[in-house]
Image (cartoon, rainbow, N blue to C red):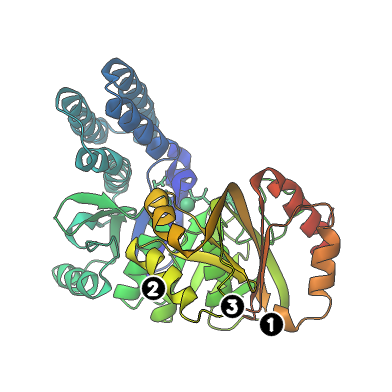
Amino acid sequence: MKVMKFGGTSVGKPERMHQVMELITRDEEPKIVVLSALSGTTNALVAIGDSLSKGEKEKAKAQIDKLSEHYQEFITALVEKEDALQKAQAIVHEHFEFLHIILKISFNQALNKDILAQGELLSTKLFCVYLEERGIPHVLLPALDFMTIDAFDEPQIGSIKVKLSQILQHHPDQKLFITQGYISRNAKGEVDNLKRGGSDYSASLIAAAIQASVCEIWTDINGMHNNDPRVVNKTFPIDQLSFEEAAELAYFGAKILHPASIWPAQTYNIPVKLLNTMEPDAKGTLIVQEAGSKGVKAIAAKDGIYAIKIKSSRMLLAYGFLRKIFEVFEKYRTPIDMITTSEVAVSLTIDSAYYLKAILKELEPFGTVEIDDHQSIVSIVGNEITHTPDVLSKLFAALSSVPVRMVSYGGSRHNVSVLIPSQHKVKTLQLLNEGLFGLS
Ligand code: ADP
Ligand code: ASP
Ligand code: MG
């Protein structure tokens, strides 16, 4: 059995859903198809939630009506027969009715998660109507019946596995299953989600849970590129990445993959393929245990980073100093991304300001604390790059005009990271494309 995940642009137009139908019926292998919301929908739902959280009900209503119009147009072009159209209309009506009811009740965060879930619920149900019209046998698996996260928002792979296999046992003769990406149930049993871009994570978790032959991530580009194609001109797809390399790139900002989407596939050794719905025969990127080749593979950048410097004149003598600092971050469940030390100070980075105030207060007794916001981590990822000649000299030559705040080298053999002010990110990515790949 395999998993095929299609992102927002891959289902964002009626003709794309047609392409998806063709891709999932190309071979006989049983499959679970994971769908995102139609492109733009989750952003629209976020905006509706924002308006409601500010009490701007009129604005929210206008946003809901605009989105509803989009879906009316979408379904008219998606299906041909009258009865299929009626079914699609009933689905759209049901979900927009729900959004209209929400306008009348008082807003809270749990309700917001319900709003955000509407996109994937709509896309999967409409796709099933389309499949039914075409006479393609399938079963819709509600993700909310098996995709669960614990009180710390961590997916519970053991329970996902048990629940999913029980559900699949009820359909021994079926070969095609459709389910929602992104959405989940939390420890309280409420509707929740795996954070933005989370459908990749759903796909990888499902692939791990069913021990799939492969987890295919179908998107709008021919695989993982060597640099961010949104801001760098000459980029190219990478044939093969190891799980470690892919995980580093995803974590450090390559938008094509959700930051946490690699570990489930890696843990259960499921190959991941990044493929292009618009160019299905392009090679894409294969992600497996082996890296395939040596040297620098790709560069990615992660924004919204805070650098915290703790300076203590007594640090050199004080073993246990780092432990005390780390305990503060542990207490507030805030992961540290980069860290560098000198004899008198330690600098580290975090990507969430949620507990920043409390963290800073608890760090104060350890020395002088300084904070820089609007920082970006730029990561150079590859296989054995710390053993590849010239990487550092090329890196620093390329960055001679960039004010580098921190450098992390030697933590693993696959990564060199630099911290820079975000305003220099685009220039940095471009300079590195030239300096490390000879492309300008
Ligand atoms: P989907 O909706 O299919 O999940 P996303 O928009 O989440 O698609 O991810 C695909 C996009 O990621 C690409 O269109 C591209 O602009 C962006 N991207 C950023 N960095 C990279 C990279 N290194 N390689 C490929 N795509 C990247
Ligand atoms: N629809 C969700 C989002 O836009 C999940 C996803 O696309 O992966 O974030
Ligand atoms: Mg995505």
Instruction: Residue 69: name its quadrant.
Output: top left
Q: Separation of disc 3 and disc 2 at Cα? A: 40 Å
- Which badge, 1 or 3, is on the more N-terminal residue? 3
Q: Is mark 3 within 8 Å of ligand 1?
A: no
How far across and how far down the image is residue 361, in percent?
Answer: 40, 53
Q: Is residue 247 left or right of residue 268?
A: right
**Front in this rendered view, residue 209 or 427:** 427
Instruction: Residue 325: name its quadrant.
Output: bottom left
How far across and how far down the image is residue 74, in percent?
Answer: 38, 31
How far across and how far down the image is residue 287, in percent?
Answer: 54, 73
Residue type of the residue flagged with mark 3:
Leu
- The residue where tag 2 is placed is 264
Query: Could you tell me which residue is drawn at 30 percent across and 62 percent down?
Result: 176
- The residue where tag 1 is placed is 384
Q: Is residue 17 left or right of residue 113?
A: right
**Front in this rendered view, residue 10 or 333:** 333
- Which badge, 3 or 2, is on the more N-terminal residue? 2
Q: Disc 3 vs disc 2: which is toward the camera?
A: 3
